[in-house]
């Protein structure tokens, strides 16, 4: 037993049907997994003891991710591999612990995130060029915050990494700001494309996956 609880960070993926659960449901799922894994979890003191769990970036319902993070505390020393092994043994399908380690950074240091957007469509062969054109200019979108709704140009906070296509599919890779005041939800990109080029339309299915997060420099992967 440690004299002081040890904070540990778990990097995990959230895919498949689990991408449709809310943040609250994810928190409940994690707490249930802690109990069934028999990890030596540290609980808060008082009338309602509970694990002190903190997650990294908010993730919209319906968005998958390969790079989620959660911090919690342990009462005993365990190597990262053992933590991942115990969690993966009880995680539901769609959640997978990738790595576990003692954190040296804060979630507030995250500044950017990469997203892969896949749009299923009967391509005319012109979408790629049209997407490049509209995303290379101003990107005015309606953004709702605590202060209300206003039109904001998100272009300075969006980096188009690539546009490609395969039979029946268009693929975009974008790097979006995660800073509190300039946060860009990938839905803004999809809504802008629909409004300006009619693509994706209501008939087109699409998927969004967060693939990597970075420090504020936009190039160093977050740990």
Image: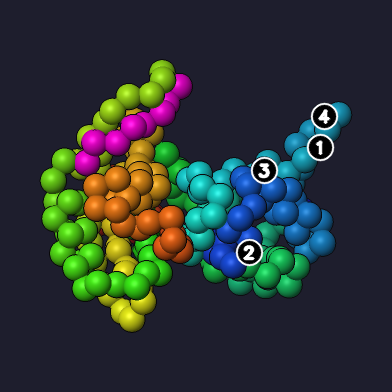
In space, the residues marked 1 and 4 are separated at their CA atoms by 6 Å
Residue mark closest to the camera, 1 vs 3? 3
Residue to which mark 1 is pinned: 49
Q: Earlier in the sequence, mark 2 or mark 1?
A: 2
Magenta residues? 139-146
Predominant SS along the magenta part: strand
Residue, x 31% and y 57% (percent of image)?
Answer: 199
Left of 216 or right of it: where is 136?
Answer: left
Judge by depth and name the residue closer to the eye, 177 or 53: 177
In space, the residues marked 2 and 1 are separated at their CA atoms by 30 Å
Q: Earlier in the sequence, mark 2 or mark 3?
A: 2
Q: Earlier in the sequence, mark 4 or mark 2?
A: 2
Task: Give the numbered dot on residue 24.
Answer: 3
Left of 55 or right of it: where is 26?
Answer: right
Residue mark closest to the camera, 2 vs 1? 2
Identify whether 223 is placed above or below 23.
below
Residue, x 82% and y 62% (percent of image)?
Answer: 36
- Residue positioned most to the right: 47
Q: Mark 1–mark 4 contact, CB under 8 Å?
A: yes
Magenta stretch: includes residue 165: no
Residue to which mark 4 is pinned: 46
In space, the residues marked 4 and 2 are separated at their CA atoms by 36 Å
In space, the residues marked 3 and 4 are separated at their CA atoms by 22 Å
Residue to which mark 2 is pinned: 17
Left of 209 or right of it: where is 22?
Answer: right
């Amino acid at each position: 037993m440690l004299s002081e609880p040890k904070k540990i960070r778990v990097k995990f993926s959230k895919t498949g049907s689990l991408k449709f659960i809310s943040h609250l449901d994810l928190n409940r799922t994690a707490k249930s997994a802690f109990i069934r894994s028999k990890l030596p979890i540290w609980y808060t003191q008082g009338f309602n003891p509970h694990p002190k769990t903190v997650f990294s970036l908010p993730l919209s319902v319906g968005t998958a991710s390969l790079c989620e993070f959660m911090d919690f505390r342990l009462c005993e020393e365990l190597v990262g591999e053992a933590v991942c092994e115990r969690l993966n043994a009880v995680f539901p399908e769609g959640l997978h612990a990738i790595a576990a380690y003692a954190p040296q950074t804060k979630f507030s240091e995250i500044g950017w995130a990469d997203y892969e957007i896949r749009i299923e469509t009967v391509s005319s062969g012109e979408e790629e060029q049209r997407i490049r054109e509209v995303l290379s200019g101003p990107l005015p979108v309606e953004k709702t915050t605590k202060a209300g709704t206003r039109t904001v140009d998100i272009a300075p906070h969006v980096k188009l990494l690539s546009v490609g296509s395969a039979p029946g599919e268009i693929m975009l890779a974008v790097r979006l700001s995660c800073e509190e005041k300039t946060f860009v939800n990938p839905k803004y990109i999809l809504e802008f494309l629909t409004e300006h080029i009619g693509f994706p339309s209501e008939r087109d299915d699409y998927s969004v996956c967060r693939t990597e997060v970075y420090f504020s420099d936009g190039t160093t992967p977050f740990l």
